Image: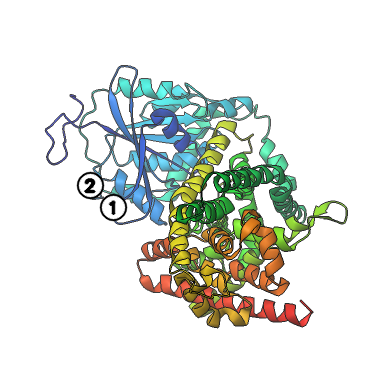
Amino acid sequence: MGAVEKSLPGLPVQSRTPMVALLGNPNCGKTALFNRLTGARQKVANYAGVTIERKEGSFNSPEGHAFRVLDLPGAYSLSAHTPDEEITRDVVAGKRAGDPAPDVVVCVVNATNLRLNLRLVLEIKRLGLPMILALNMVDVASKRGMRIDADRLAQELGMPVVETVAVQAGGEKSLLRALDGMWPLAATQPHPLSAIDAVGVEETQREVRRILELVSNDVNDSGNLSEKIDNVVLHPVLGPVILAVLMFLVFQAVFSWAATPMEMITAGVEHLAAWMTASMPPGLLHSLLVDGVMGGVGGVLVFLPQILILFFFILFLEDCGYLPRAAFLLDRLMGGVGLSGRAFIPLLSSFACAIPGVMAARTIQNRRDRLVTIMIAPLMTCSARLPVYALIIAAFIPDREVAGFMNLQGLVLFLLYFAGIISAMAVAWVMKRFMHTKAHQALMMELPAYHWPHMRNLGLGLWERAKIFVTRVGTIILTLTILLWVLSSFPGAPEGATHPPIYYSLAGIIGRGLEFIFAPIGFNWQICIALVPGMAAREVAVGALGTVYALSQSGDEVAQALAPIIGSTWSLPTALSLLAWYVFAPQCMATLSTVRRETNSVRFAWLMAGYLFALAYVASFLTYRIALAFGG
């Protein structure tokens, strides 16, 4: 290609596609620019030896030149303080095996916050690599009346400066033209990392201020609307109240808005099961499809609307810029238990799934804070618990208004989520005392400007969540449901049997064996059966209960929804005990595996499983006994 003098082992010179590295502060629009450049031509993997995500893609410039592009983790400085920043530093400096230094670095900066962003630009410049400065969000800066002289900025920095708007179609064209203008790319080895520290931080900041005085004019800045909103949203009294009200409304909507689509899915599953029953003769295949697949998978699929509504609000608040504010609001509360407000984002991610929450903890600088955050992340109520909560609440909690405006079922769901949060804070407090951690560290975090969420990004996020859930239903849950059906169907009932056939099956034998352990907390053998496949994925417990009770019923009862069945066969103390169990429910195998990789120790994975099981058992025991004492 005439673009590369250096080559990878095994590849001839001038045959390797040049690599472009996108680098910048968090919230500068770097990933949006990556998506704009690559479209669907991207792949996601992990860096060798770590679980930090590596996003790489490819694109062709207007003149037909091919490039690879790497989206590096966000960093404020190459003086790395977190695992993410270490990866960014080592990749740019060519210090990672299998990751040669990039051929050109595109440093993406937020045009409305050059004072913070330019420090990183000056640090990278000292490595001596070819660079382009992408002045992103220039549309927002222009609306605020901010003027930036891009030509003078290029002159001062000694590199091309282009204006981009990553969220708009065509907003990357100036960058593509600049890359074509640098063609062919000459081979360049980066200077040693010691070059970065050759200039002190104070001197770097003086240079930033000098450049800003020459290239920017904020005299006509109309004022930052975000700051005006923050005067209310971050108010020490009003702020927490607004946050609590927002979260309360979200959980109210999960039940209120989802009612109609859930009824439609339930009706569709029931009609399909009735059609199968009418079309097929009784036998093993009929039992597999109706009792196993429809009873299990259909029982989980019905909760898709609630999951999507929950994630709609989470994605909306994240995209508009509110979630970092929530981190600041909770910093004082979290500091009281020895955590930093920076732990808020990993813990919030755990509401989707504990796995991304555990992985997001790597952005926390202090190792002990990072470890405690990992250990309490599973106490956040992940989406896998929502089907279990929704099933039990629908069966035992009346669907009625409280105080004229609150839905009782939504209120109970809110209290369950709140119980998980309080439990996490309590566990963090205990862990910090045992670990003798230093005093609470101050939180420093950039607050992005508020903006209206991009509906395309919101839609893509919901589509990804729906695809993940449906894929799990069609793979993991379906597989475990079929396996459970096999265990629940064989061997058959002996002659003269007085119980349903499942009672004498392998699953029934396992369930009755576990019942000895779980009887003190009110669990029957059907619940014990469902807990076993729930170790693979907790929402499988609902499908498992659907299969178990479908095989435990007879005649027309098979076609009934699961909620009425358990509502008539369980006691209220048992239902409350199971809710308490799932507040602390021991983690699925995938989460424990991620904890082992993130901590490089199997000891912490076993510690997590052990303490969560103990908490779940104690909480369920107390709940069950107290409910019995009050006449449950």
Q: Residue furthest right?
A: 404
| Left or right, residue 4 beside residue 171 | left
Q: Amino acid at mark 2?
A: Gly
| Sequence-first tag of 2 and 1 | 1
Instruction: Return the mark for residue 147.
Output: none
**Would residue 486 appear left or right of 380 to someone viewing this image?**
left
The quadrant of the picture occupied by the C terminus is bottom right
Tell me, for residue 98, which label it has, or none. 2
Q: Is residue 251 visible?
A: yes
Which mark, residue 48?
1
Mark 1 nearby-residue class (10 Å; few <14, some 14–19, many ≥20): few
Q: In x, y percent, where is residue 490?
A: 43, 67
Q: Position of residue 500 (x, y in %)?
A: 56, 69
Instruction: Give coordinates of residue 115: x percent, y percent.
Output: 52, 39
Q: Is residue 442 visible?
A: no
Query: In the image as oriented, which residue stretches furthest toward the top?
Result: 63
Query: What residue is at 71 percent from the left and 66 percent from the top?
Result: 568
Residue at 53% over, 52% down: 290
Specify the quadrant that holds the N terminus.
top left
User: Compared to 130, does 227 lie above or below?
Assistant: below
Residue 104, above or below 391: above
Amino acid type of disc 1? Ala
For the residues bearing labels 2 and 1, Cβ distance under 8 angstroms: yes
- Of 394 and 140, the residue lying toward us: 394
Nearer to me, 472 or 174: 472
Extreme residue in the front direction: 495
Task: Say which residue appears at 42% left-offset and 34% top-offset.
Answer: 34
Q: Between marks 2 and 1, how big is the CA–CA gap? A: 8 Å
